[in-house]
Image (cartoon, rainbow, N blue to C red):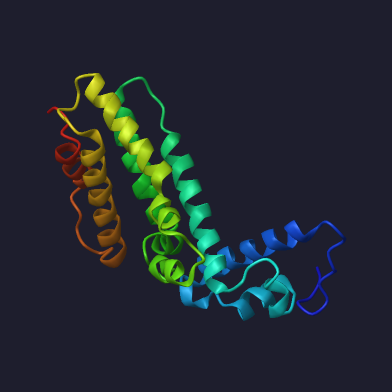
């Protein structure tokens, strides 16, 4: 294994590999420390085995790295939400909600940067590194999975929703609030059926 000061230089055309190494290092620091502030250009460079200026051809600043990690995290969340199968629409929706909460619990720091933690989307928009459309589009695919799952419940007669988008947004917010509270007060005696108590009324599911 090469030391931080002796990392082998990438051959021509291998710049993408260094970019991936930078992202992997940033993600590892985030997961290992549990502290988004620990993801600095210097710390990432040290982990990869390069000098900090070597990052600039790939990422203009720390926020650019965090933005890419945020996009990757939303992509992973979307993939997990799409995973639940089953024939029954209600069971699929519950599976989607469980997958959301599980992702938040198992990737707490990545989840935090997705929703305004150390990565500041408003600052990125102000700096011109992110458009308003891109900022509002983060998480759109994941939300669409929730919308489609709820719509399937309506079509099967298992939900009384008459506006699946609005109710899916409310459900998303309910899941987000539950995920956040579980993270900040883990010792609270949460009811065993708390997920059902949040999902059922927000998704307007039949009893």
Horizontal side of residue 191 vs 59, given as left or right: left
Image location of residue 76, percent across then percent down: 50, 47
Quadrant containing the N terminus in the rendered view: bottom right
Q: Residue at x 57, y 66 (%)?
A: 65
Q: In this view of the protein, can residue 168 be seen by the observer?
A: yes
Q: Position of residue 147 (x, y in %)?
A: 31, 35
Going 56% across and 73% down the picture, which residue do you hit?
62
Outermost residue toward the right?
11
Give residue 154's quadrant in the image.
top left
Q: In this image, 170 relative to 117: left or right? A: left
Residue 206, percent across and down? 14, 27
Number of marks present in the image shown: 0
- Residue 86 vertical position relative to residue 17 in the rendered view, above or below: above
Task: Establish if 89 lies above or below 117.
Answer: above
Against 49, is 186 above or below?
above
The residue that appears at 87% across and 61% down in the rendered structure is 11
Residue at 23 percent across and 34 percent down: it is 164
Nearest the camera: 109 or 136?
136
Picture coordinates of residue 127 (x, y %)? Answer: 47, 72
Residue 35 seen in the figure: no
């Amino acid at each position: 294994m090469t030391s931080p000061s002796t990392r082998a230089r990438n051959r021509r055309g291998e710049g993408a590999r260094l970019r991936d190494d930078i992202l992997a290092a940033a993600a590892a620091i985030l997961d290992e420390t549990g502290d988004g502030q620990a993801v600095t250009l210097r710390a990432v460079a040290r982990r990869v085995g390069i000098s900090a200026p070597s990052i600039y051809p790939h990422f203009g600043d720390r926020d650019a790295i965090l933005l890419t990690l945020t996009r990757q995290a939303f992509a992973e969340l979307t993939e997990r939400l799409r995973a639940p199968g089953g024939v029954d629409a209600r069971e699929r929706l519950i599976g989607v909600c469980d997958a959301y909460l599980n992702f938040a619990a198992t990737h707490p720091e990545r989840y935090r940067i997705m929703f305004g933690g150390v990565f500041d989307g408003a600052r990125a928009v102000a700096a011109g590194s992110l458009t308003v459309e891109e900022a509002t589009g983060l998480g759109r695919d994941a939300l669409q999975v929730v919308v489609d799952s709820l719509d399937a419940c309506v079509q099967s007669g298992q939900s009384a929703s008459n506006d699946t988008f609005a109710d899916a947004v409310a459900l998303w917010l309910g899941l987000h609030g539950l995920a956040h509270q579980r993270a900040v007060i883990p010792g609270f005696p949460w009811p065993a059926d708390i997920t059902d108590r949040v999902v059922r009324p927000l998704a307007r599911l039949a009893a």
